[in-house]
Amino acid sequence: MSEPADASAAASRVVRIPALTRVEGEAALHLRVHDGTVTEARLKIYEPPRFFEAFLRGRAHTEPVDITSRICGICPVAYQLSACRAIEDVSGIVVDGRLDALRRLLYCGEWIESQTLHVHLLHAPDFLGCADLVDMAGSHREHVERGLRLKQTGNAVMELLGGRAIHPINVRLGGFHRTPTRAELRPLAERLRRSLDDAWDTVRWVARFDFPEAHCDADLLALAEPGTYAIQSGVPTVLPADRGLAPYSFPVRSFSDHVTEEQVPHSTALHSRLDGRRHLTGSLARYAVSGHLLSALAREAAREAGLSDPPLAPGTPQGEVCRNPYRSILVRAVEVLYAVEEALRIIDVYEPPEHPYVDVPAQAGVGHGATEAPRGLLYHRYALDTEGRITDACLVPPTAQNQGAIEEDLRVLVQAALAGGTTSDAELAHLCERAVRNHDPCISCSAHFLDVDIQGDGGSAPRSRRAR
């Protein structure tokens, strides 16, 4: 809907979109235009916080792996493994070898099901002129069916490794409660081999979409790991939007020194800045940082689909990376193909570990962990006391980091649309919803609470509390 900003300013208008569709969670858009210039573009997340950071305090060090998986039903593995890495970091435990490979296999399952959900069911209708999935199923049934098959394959990986497809129960500190036998993995491998064709077809299908011109002017942040496309571990690496700034990396333990959060009045989610600048994490960032480490098959798919070649290696001058948010659906399709192939590679060389987990003793200290959720880099930090009880927790999801970049995308998009003669509320609303869906926000994950108004007797300095 549209209304004058005030009665004395006929040249001003406010456009409100009260509820976004085909995204996870609840949010609204608020646009303010004055004399043809977009002065405000706000992604208003109004979901109430769920206080996960608060009720993690006082829990045993073994509990975050199960508690945090409930934050998101689409990417619970990301929360579980980020929590594991942070708690294991306190004790100096490194899970490697066969157990780490199984973690990567589980994460591949989540990438397959989550990225496929977005590509086929949430984002593709925008490119096909369909109102929603039901509409799309009527005119593009074969593509919907292919998407459901791929998602079921990802779910099958989650069920076998995690015990169930949503909120897995087989993951624990140091590994798993139980690891599969080679015989149990054999039917899964056959299913994955059949899914390779579906994943290839998805890349070719998405490559035929008509992609509007757009450019995301934000720093790109993703994990980087030598020799492999980073998923369940790595070093935060930045490709600045300003080509005058060199790419750089920093340790996971320094994440909060570089990525700072602030409360904004229009959202229950915090906004983040990377060294004082807007940044974007997710598929576009991963492809820019580590696209050269995709498998040969995935690189071939990317080339056939027309994606720009990524830089030769992190730390080198930026190459022709993909910065068009509309083309993020294509990068996600390539990542699904990669995850299917990577899952097959892990299964083909799998030998059951001698023990399903390594012990992670309780120890005082602060631990940091980060993994690549389908939507981008997810960071966890926990402080433990001498009994292994959690005294503080900090969770920074990718959507909270991406909000600044999303709002800037909206401002630029609407400004260009107005200059091109697009003025109706309906048209602007459609453009904005498409722009938000480019980033596949997980809104419920980002909802947060910050109380900065607590004062003690005698006018003592304010204190703050945070609760994701």
Image: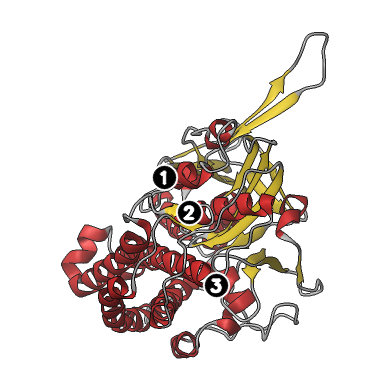
Q: Position of residue 396 (x, y in %)?
A: 61, 48
Look at the numbered disc 3 and give the secondary structure of its residue.
Answer: helix
- Identify the residue under disc 2: 441
Q: Identity of the amino acid at label 2?
A: Pro
Residue on which disc 3 sits:
97
Can residue 227 be spotted in the picture?
A: yes
Other residues around mark 1 within 10 Å, as few (<14) / some (14–19) / many (≥20) = some
Q: Answer with left or right where residue 280 lies relative to residue 294.
A: right
Residue at (36, 69) in percent of width and height: 127
Q: Mark 2 or mark 3: which is in front?
A: 3
Q: Quarter-wise, where is residue 219 in the image?
A: bottom right
Mark 2 or mark 3: whose residue is earlier in sequence: 3
Judge left or right: residue 208 versus residue 142.
right
Residue at the front extreme?
A: 354
Which is more N-terminal, label 1 or label 2?
Answer: 1
Query: What residue does disc 1 label?
Result: 25
Residue at the spot x=40%, y=47% of the render? 20
Query: Is the C-beta separation of discs 2 and 3 under 8 Å?
Result: no
Quadrant of image for the C terminus: top right
Q: Is residue 299 above or below residue 33?
A: below
Between circles 3 and 1, the one closer to the viewer is 3
